[in-house]
Amino acid sequence: MSRARRASCFVAEEVGHVLLKNYMESCEDANYVISPVSVFIAMSMLKHGADGSTKDQLERALLVSPHTHGNEARHVLSVLLPSSDSLVAMSTTNANGLFLQEGIEPALSFVTDMRRIFHASVESAKFGSLEGEQKINHWIERESLGKMKDSLTDTSEDDIMALINIVLLRGRWKEVFKKADTIHSNFHVSPEKTVKAEIMRQRGVFRYVRKEIERFTVVFLPYRRKSEPAWEMGILVPDEGLNPIDYLKQLQPDALKKLRSEMEDETLVVHVPKFKSESFIDLKRYIMQMGAISPFTEHAEFPGICDSTPLSVSRIYQKCSVEIDEEGTDAENVTAICDLRRKSLAKAESIDFMATSPFLFFVYQPDSGIMLFCGRVTDPTV
């Protein structure tokens, strides 16, 4: 991978970690999941139409230079696009969309950038109508292979456009778990609460590290692939009784790179619960915490989108789902910036890796450092 691509992916992950930290520290749900890289791509699309202080704030939030002209997002997409094959069907190809209110004439340069840099589909839709919402939702459903339904609702006639990014992951474990080895066993939600969960088990050689002083363990479960780059699911389990949120710093790009360099191939008996985690996240407050406030106010400047109509962002949200079972991982995500409105090697003995208490999980590509999905599981039975 080129130095420029690697640097861009690092920037995307730094931004993603700030977003991840802001979100996870405020989330009260037991289980949740977010796709930081999807937010980075969607915000990068928005930045292309911004100017003045709005553009400055978006660039600072995205940690990008004003002179890069979208290269960071282009480099990130160039890593994601070729990751699809018949074994690991992970794709963002043709999964960026720009939908414009009927009758609105956007800036030609903005439409050109959306198509050239983001490979976006550009269409018109009648916002504020069932017909318009159905058109957009049918596009989202088609691009998400039928997984994401009714993602966009409550549009208004005052809405000018919607920017949409979809990320999918279809990953089959390199070594699948045998269903016959899955058992109902204890998962320790807290010192006071234990539930019965479906725990998958497998003995094999995995990348593993145990940090005694920091009191946590990490394992990487690889997905099948025909060729590089590889994708893996990392599972970070603090010692029982500790809060996974306190270990978010281990997922920072530099920390995770160092952590992975310390891992060794070990013979493990892995115990991991089957689970499905879903989240609907109103991202506005978290984006504002990153310093991008102007886009949501009457002072927003988006002349690059539509120079004849003053715009501001009303909503930015994400619907995200991750499910793992014996075969692998199914994950899908839709990030929508919408309602831009008129102003308004093995050892002899095996080691037990027990993900039987609250843990963090993340889908990660070691080569680029990109974290596609990340979440917390407190109770896999919820």
Image (cartoon, rainbow, N blue to C red):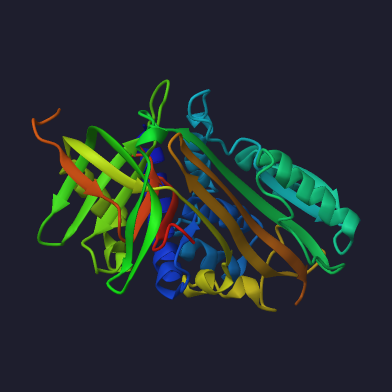
Residue 24 picture quarter: bottom left
Q: Residue at x 35, y 36 (%)?
A: 181
In front of the other: 198 or 130: 198
On screen, 351 above or below 345?
below
In front of the other: 75 or 190: 190
Instruction: Using residue 282 as the reference point, say whether residue 327 is left or right of it.
Output: left
Q: Residue at x 67, y 38 (%)?
A: 145
Q: Residue at x 73, y 57 (%)?
A: 162
Q: Residue at x 53, y 23 (%)?
A: 86
**Does residue 50 appear in the picture of this structure?**
yes
Instruction: Using residue 335 as the reference point, say whether residue 360 is left or right of it.
Output: left
Tell me where residue 294 appears, x and y as whole percent.
60, 74
Instruction: Using residue 64 as the reference point, say whether residue 131 is left or right of it.
Output: right
**Does residue 101 appear in the picture of this structure?**
no
In front of the other: 124 or 148: 148
Residue 319 picture quarter: bottom right
Residue 264 picture quarter: top left
Q: How many marks?
A: 0
Tell me where residue 351 appears, x and y as whole percent.
15, 42
Split into 4 quadrants, where in the image is the N terminus?
top left
Tell me where residue 220 appears, x and y as whole percent.
29, 41
On screen, 256 above or below 116?
below
Instruction: Using residue 237 as the reference point, say whether residue 105 is left or right of it.
Output: right
In front of the other: 248 or 67: 248
On screen, 211 above or below 295?
above
Tell me where residue 340 appears, x and y as whole percent.
73, 65
Q: Give the residue furthest to the top.
A: 226
